[in-house]
Amino acid sequence: MTTPIHEGDVIAVRVTKVLPFGVLVETSTGVPGLMRPGRVELGAVVDVRVDEFDGERFSAGPV
């Protein structure tokens, strides 16, 4: 069972790929997301605030 994600939640995610347009991240339960660009390293665990969640993936910004 996965923990539900809601808009406005602050969650910890792992950086899986850094791209020019954003950062691909994933929760500990495997839910993929896109974070606004920022200074992060591949593999880092960071806290983000969820902007949108469609039931399968989310978009977020750094806290």
Image (cartoon, rainbow, N blue to C red):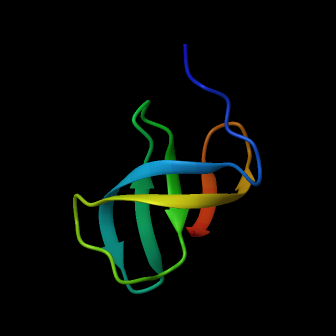
Percent position of residue 12, x then y: 46, 49
- Image quadrant of residue 54? top right
Along the horizontal axis of the image, is 55 left or right of 47?
right
What is the quadrant of the N terminus in the image?
A: top right
**Left or right of 42 on screen, residue 23:** right
Quadrant of the snapshot with the C terminus: bottom right
Q: Is residue 25 above or below residue 39?
A: above
Q: Is residue 30 above or below residue 46?
A: above
At x 39%, y 86%, the residue is 20
Left/right placement of residue 12 relative to residue 41 reads right
Number of callouts: 0
In the image, residue 45 lies at what x, y percent?
Answer: 33, 55
Q: Residue at horizontal 42%, vertical 35%?
A: 30
- 11 lies above or below 52: above
Image location of residue 61, percent across then percent down: 59, 70
Q: Residue furthest top?
A: 1
At x 48% / y 58%, what residue is drawn? 47
Q: Nearer the viewer, residue 18 or 5?
A: 5
The residue sitting at 36% across, 78% down in the picture is 19
